[in-house]
Amino acid sequence: MTDPPTHVTTLLAVPNVSEGRDPSAIEAIGAAFDARLLDVHSDPDHHRTVFTLAGRPGRLAPAVRDGALASIERVDLALHGGLHPRVGAVDVAPIVFLREADRGAACAEALALADMLGAEQVPVFLYGILANGRTRADLRRGGPVALAQRIERGELMPDFGPRGLHRTAGAVLVSARPPLIAFNVELAPPATVDDARAIAARIREGGPEGLDSVRAIGLWLTQRGVAQVSMNIEDHTTIRLADVVAAIDSHATVAEAELVGLAPRHAFEGFPHDVPVRNKRLIEDALGATDPWAD
């Protein structure tokens, strides 16, 4: 038996699907992603499922494409009702690099994925490092109706695929990026959705307290009956989750937190022991449970 290679490039994909309530559909979509499935996180209030996959360059893009096609068969965006902003049945499908040395491989894989989805007649918009920093928030602003209007006015055109939105699947946003942390904090009663929105506006980047790389919105979770500050930490090297929790706790009592998908281990350095975290799973642990050079 030959020795394993000293380094095999492993990329992650994190397709976000606009279905978080139908277990049979979620299971079928997960099975269609023909890659190592590291994590599945569904939320009925957000009506969204985040899949985390691992694979080698050249293999990951086709696996994401296959799962995306299964999602399109099962999700009609016109009938969708959920709290999370979205413009597609597969709303975003980023390719994630874990080492800076693998950035080029991730960019190439993301572009291959975008081309494959476009060939399936689903319009694809690039964002982030593949689109001069254009953001998901800019593309999602106003939802699929506003995006379709911008296309009709000639203000914006898909980078791959047809020039108009798919009738039921909308569009897919694709990029390459380092790990992003999707992190939610629930506020203890009697906090309201207005409290959550006010806190989100204060702590997000550009707000009065301006936490670097933090994107935040305030929501009310009907299923759980609590107010939530829902966040993306775009660059986990610039701020710890402990600092995010402390900023929120200075305005309202934090009841608990939730991790969506996987996070790097060091993001939890100094995290308060008295704040429970649902679904806490680390990238290092998930990859360690698999054979990194398996076919």
Image: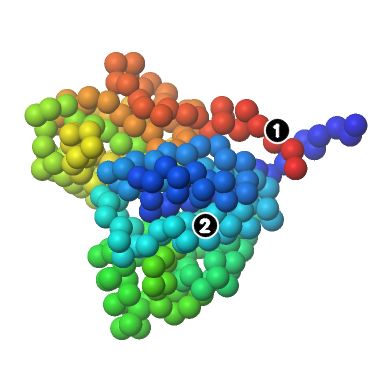
Percent coordinates x, y for residue 170 in the rendering: 39, 67
Identified at 56% across, 31% down, the residue is 286
Measure the C-alpha gap from mark 2 to mark 1: 27 Å
Front-lying residue, 67 or 118:
67
Front-lying residue, 70 or 248:
70
Q: Which residue is mark 1?
A: 291
Colour scheme shown? rainbow
Say few, some or many: other residues with alpha carbon within 10 Å of mark 1 (under 14 / 14 to 19 / 20 or more).
Answer: few
- Given the image, on which type of amino acid does mark 1 rest? Asp
Point out the residue furthest to the top here.
Answer: 273
Q: Quadrant of the C terminus?
A: top right
Q: Quadrant of residue 5?
A: top right
Percent coordinates x, y for residue 249 in the rendering: 20, 27
Identified at 42% across, 52% down, the residue is 17
Position above or below: 119 against 71: below
Position above or below: 12 against 87: above
Identified at 39% across, 41% down, the residue is 42
The answer, for residue 253, to whether it is visible in the render is: yes
Q: Which residue is mark 2?
A: 70
Q: Quadrant of residue 117?
A: bottom right
- Given the image, on which type of amino acid does mark 2 rest? Ala
Front-lying residue, 181 or 142:
142
Which callout, 2 or 1, points to the residue nearer the camera?
A: 2
Position above or below: 142 against 287: below
Left or right, 274 with reference to 67 = left
- The numbered mark at residue 241 is none
The answer, for residue 95, to whether it is visible in the render is: no
Percent coordinates x, y for residue 40 in the rendering: 47, 39
Percent coordinates x, y for residue 187 in the rendering: 19, 30
Point out the residue furthest to the right here.
Answer: 1
